[in-house]
Image (spheres, rainbow, N blue to C red):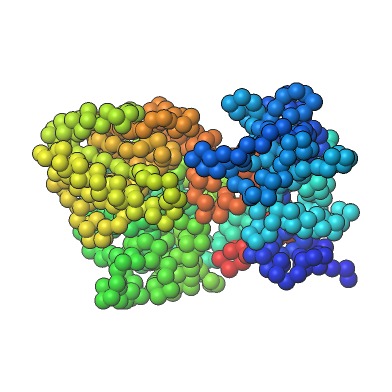
Amino acid sequence: MKPDPARQAVDILRGVGPQLAAKLAARGLGTLQDLWLHLPLRHEDRTRLTPIAQLRQGQPAQVHGRVEAVERGFRGRPMLRVAVGDDSGATLVLRFFHFRAAQVQAFRVGSRILCHGEARGGQFSMEMVHPSYRLLDQDAELVLGERLDPVYPAVEGIGPVQLARIINHALDHLPNDDTLELLPATLFGDTRLPSWRDAVRLLHRPPADVDHAALAQHRHPAQQRLALEELLAHQLSLRRQRLAMKRRGAPALNPPGELARKLLAALPFALTGAQQRVLDTITQDLAQNQPMLRLVQGDVGSGKTIVAALAALTAIESGAQVALMAPTELLAEQHAQAFQNWFTPLGIELVWLAGKVKGKARTAALERITAGAPIVVGTHALVQEHVAFANLGLVIVDEQHRFGVHQRLALSDKGRNAPGTARDNAGERIPHQLVMTATPIPRTLAMTAYADLDISVIDELPPGRTPVQTVAINAQRRGELIERIRAACIEGRQAYWVCTLIEESEDPPAPGVPKIDAQAAQSAYELLREQLPEVNVGLIHGRMKPAEKQSTMAAFKAGDIQLLVATTVIEVGVDVPNASLMLIENAERLGLAQLHQLRGRVGRGAAASTCVLMYQTPLSQLARERLSVMRETTDGFRIAEKDLELRGPGELLGTRQTGLAGFRIADPVRDAALLPQVQAAADALLARAPQQADLLIERWIGHAVRYASA
Ligand code: ADP
Ligand code: MG
């Protein structure tokens, strides 16, 4: 039997020995197919020349000319400038900041040079910064490329030229027939897309006459063809994961009973229609002997917590354990407090578990969990090895975009084969899963990112909220703002002062980021205490001890602290309805999602709230747009849509969100128009050709797919 060409290991390629193979493997490139799908990020066109006089700002081009002058200088840092002229009579300046002495030597006035780079307007002429270039012998024949050059995503330890050569060898093994075609011809209707093989080949080796503009804008049919397939593979993988989970059993939980009724009666408010509707759906899910897999989306402040609490009571009343996991300790603590307030009067004990719970307290917590404590609230400490539940029936994950899918699954694994509750069913069982997020995204995108989940939306805010008024103010007017806080606090209002990263040096801030944030908060705190002697100022940041954080939050809740200086640790979940003023320093540095979350900390009570976005000038275009979006709307969906436009999905949904991260060629936002087709194709394929589905998943996502063991 002939070996499957796609699955052949990379070391069959000429020049690829064990060391190189190991470097490729470290990047997930183990087979020829992996190399075929290591697709270029972009292409460079060296098939033609552009006269210098015709260079255009921002456009990449290749130029052939002669060196007219070489100038080496220091303007703060070393710099090499090489003036190049051609027959068009204009001059192009090549500018280098990193260079070796030998490189400088090689440039001689009169040398022939062929260079490629992006042209931009310089002071007196067009410039290229760090172009790629080649010096030619005086009488050498000028040979231009026959194809566009692919530029590949880097692989650590392998230079770009070598990588291109390896991939080129791999392409020589691409079968000439359609053996690797996985999409049935009719799957996407008659869209006249190229075959898989032609698409792959074209993207690696685009001919000189290819529509380069289409390629650069990702609308070439070859790109569309592969993007469709990749989106389909991701969709299939999530659906598979879902099917695998649904095949397991789950404890069927009774509808809400006495406990839920008591809690509802004790609340100072009635559920909104949207909360009630979502709760009813959850109740129906929980009554099934298949696991619930539900995502509840609801804008900041829409009241997801109480819905979660009522779902928890349903489970508890049926004799199952509930685990609630939140991404930050601060948020988890807030939930623990809220749940304790609600549940203690009902005689339900709560167990708190975070990484910082140590020693005896930890042992005690673990014992109570194993003994069947009805509700456990904590951070990702809940998924640690030593945590064993007696009878976990419902897993709730808040702000799930902050977690990876794996953490959610790890938590639900804790409830595998838990002993049964009253209505049992045979086979392996896992808990019900309720995940909550305040990141609202457009529906088709949600169905792509969360194809393994059912989605409910709490699309209504509790009554009596007045929308937060948002203003953007230059930080130079800080003095005025401080007066405003003074006045507000004297009136009995409470305020947040949020400090974000202040760039104190040009050094890469990598590991020190939170520290700098904390320092900024510390100094703002000291300054504000001085300037506002009549106001009680508090401080909270991520580097404080949990007990300190907790007592500060409690004092702010109780109104003893009037002005809370904070880092972005308060971004998620903090709930102090009396706080009605928020100032955000360096707001221009934050993304829309983060600004929206932060602003969601005010506007929670009846009082009209204000959010002041302080910014430093000069503002970038992007920052300007973000600030104006924030001023215009408080609607989380509109903000998310704008955010997607400005940033793309990875950051919005969290890079660890496997649903959308790590695409090779597709971009679910740019390619949003393809998504409905993809969903329909996934249905068709799962129904009619499940083996093809497996192969597609293997091709694009690999063997490491989690559903196998979910
Ligand atoms: P989020 O959806 O952002 O997690 P929370 O659950 O923290 O929102 O709720 C925000 C605030 O609204 C809390 O103070 C909560 O007690 C309150 N709340 C929740 N539901 C209602 C309601 N139906 N009517 C009035 N207030 C409510
Ligand atoms: Mg919340």
Kindly identify the residue that appears in the image at 81 percent across and 34 percent down: 48
Foreground of the two, 671 or 507: 507
Left or right: residue 149 compared with residue 384: right
Instruction: Measuring from the top left, give residue 279's x and y in whole percent.
Output: 40, 48
Q: Is residue 593 above or below residue 687?
A: above
Foreground of the two, 474 or 122: 122
Total labels drawn = 0
Instruction: Measuring from the top left, give residue 657's x and y in whole percent.
Output: 52, 53
Foreground of the two, 377 or 308: 377
Q: Quadrant of the N terminus?
A: bottom right
Left or right: residue 690 compared with residue 605: right
Instruction: Measuring from the top left, give residue 512's x and y in whole percent.
Output: 39, 55
Q: From this viewpoint, is residue 531 visible?
A: yes
Instruction: Measuring from the top left, give residue 233's x and y in whole percent.
Output: 67, 53
Foreground of the two, 342 or 132: 132
Q: Quadrant of the C terminus?
A: bottom right
Q: From this viewpoint, is residue 388 visible?
A: no
Q: Is residue 358 above or below residue 163?
A: below
Kindly identify the residue that appears in the image at 64 percent across and 41 percent down: 130
